[in-house]
Amino acid sequence: MPRLVIYNKTNKPQPYRFQIERKQINIGRGIDNDIVIDCPSVSTRHSLIERIEGGYILRDLNSTNGIKLNKSLMEVIDLYDGLKVIIGDIPLEFQLSAEEIEHLSKEEYTSQTKRKSSKDSVIDLTKSHDAPRINTPAPRAAASMSPPQALASTNSGLNPFLVIILMAVAVFGGMNIRHYMDHQKLLLSKSTTSEKETPPVDSKETISPSS
């Protein structure tokens, strides 16, 4: 018969045996359970051993302190020979004989182990691989760009044709300012001074009569 050994802190190990054909074994502090564990850390109806195809599982019944495997809170634990689990803060060991292991091996078995998830858990999007990626330049990177690059970056949502026009206007404005500083007049501006007209020079020389 399968055996569950309870290692109580105040008492000697207590083995409980049950028939392999039995489908459910209730564990808890209440006296109406199949296995009674008189300990404050154990809930009135704490957990349940279930016979499934190919073996056994230990299921938590929404207890206060839960069931643990390797210090991790679990919702369901697959039981196999020699496995040690904790109910509340009481260690238990599940044991099977060689004949029972051989008997169960003839059945098809599917693992049921499931870790207990907290309803209050918060997902950190900065570390998640599914976190959305926003392709915007950092403030330092934007400050180091030239004006046309910064304009194109900050207005990436604009029509590309409009961005090209704005860049052309910016370049032309810069050229206009530089030309004004060098020549004191703007590009494409008409000259404000007109050239003075000079009368044509007669190529013929006037010869005065000699006296």
Image: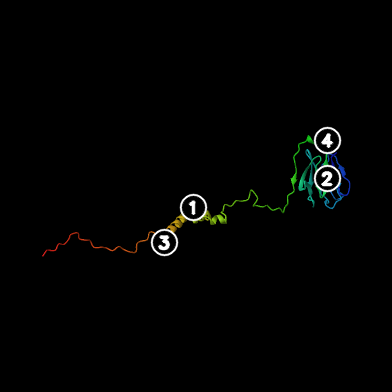
Residue 19 drawn at (x, y percent): 85, 40
Q: Which of label 3 and label 2 is nearer to you?
A: 3
Label 4 secondary element: helix
* Relative side of 180 to 92, left or right: left
Q: Which of label 3 and label 1 is nearer to you?
A: 3
Q: Tag 2: residue type?
A: Leu
Q: Tag 3: residue type?
A: Met
Calculate the distance from the C-alpha at mark 3 to the C-alpha at mark 2.
91 Å
Reading the image, the residue beneath label 4 is 98
Residue placed at 56% from the left, 56% from the top?
A: 140
Calculate the distance from the C-alpha at mark 3 to the C-alpha at mark 4.
100 Å
Q: Earlier in the sequence, mark 2 or mark 1?
A: 2
Callout 2 touching callout 1 (CB < 8 Å):
no
Q: Nearer the viewer, residue 203 or 121?
A: 203
Callout 3 touching callout 1 (CB < 8 Å):
no
Q: Which mark is residue 92?
A: 2
Residue 170 drawn at (x, y percent): 46, 57
Q: Tag 1: residue type?
A: Pro
Reading the image, the residue beneath label 1 is 160
Calculate the distance from the C-alpha at mark 2 to the C-alpha at mark 4.
20 Å
Q: Nearer the viewer, residue 51 or 123?
A: 123
Q: Nearer the viewer, residue 116 or 165?
A: 165
Callout 4 touching callout 1 (CB < 8 Å):
no
Q: Earlier in the sequence, mark 4 or mark 1?
A: 4
Location of residue 191 with respect to 108 vertically, above or below: below
Label 1 secondary element: helix
Q: Quadrant of the N terminus?
A: top right
- Which residue, as the protein is rendered here, is positioned at the far bottom? 211
Reading the image, the residue beneath label 3 is 181
Calculate the distance from the C-alpha at mark 4 to the C-alpha at mark 1.
76 Å
Residue 85 drawn at (x, y percent): 80, 45
